[in-house]
Image (tube, rainbow, N blue to C red):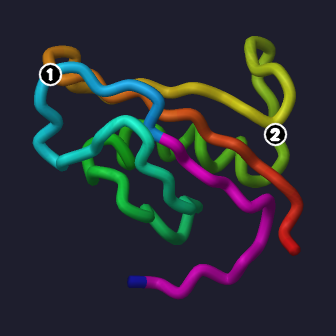
Amino acid sequence: MAQDPGIGYKVVATVIGAQGRCNAGHQEGDTFEISCHNPGALCGFFYHNIFPTLHTFQFGGCLPWWQGDTIQLECPDRRNLVTIRLERSERA
């Protein structure tokens, strides 16, 4: 895996909802750091699905429906829906 160069904002993902049975084992309350260079503990399908959004978010971009430094994203598996909250902050 590529080494995360630590550029852009620090992004922390928190699982805030899990319905059904997530095949990757994600459960409500799981928290991990994620970036464009590091998928963290996120399922590959979910990571692939959110990558363009993560790229914009990590590097300071904003979409009209985002408010502040927190966004929510949903897994593409609608039968076993996992919802995560991404929070960005300045790197220490």
Going from the N terminus, do you reach mark 2 or mark 1 first? 1
Residue range (magenta): 2-14
Q: Give the number of the mark in front: 2 or 1.
A: 1
Eyeballing the image, is 15 above or below 41?
above
Residue that numbered label 2 is attached to: 61
Tag 1: Cα neighbours inside 10 Å, few (<14), some, or many (≥20)? few
Image mark for residue 5: none
Q: Could you say where residue 28 lies in the image, as x and y percent from the top left?
A: 37, 35
Q: Could you say where residue 21 lies in the image, as x and y percent from the top left?
A: 11, 30
Image-based side of 43 in relation to 85, left or right: left
**Which secondary structure lies at badge 2?**
loop
Tag 2: Cα neighbours inside 10 Å, few (<14), some, or many (≥20)? few
Q: Could you say where residue 79 lies in the image, as x and y percent from the top left?
A: 14, 16
Query: Type of residue at label 1?
Result: Gly
* Rendered residue at 43%/62% (across/down): 39
Secondary structure predominantly adopted by residues drawn in magenta: loop
Image mark for residue 20: 1
Marks 2/1: CA distance?
33 Å
Q: Is 19 colored magenta in this rendering?
A: no
Query: Type of residue at label 2?
Result: Gly
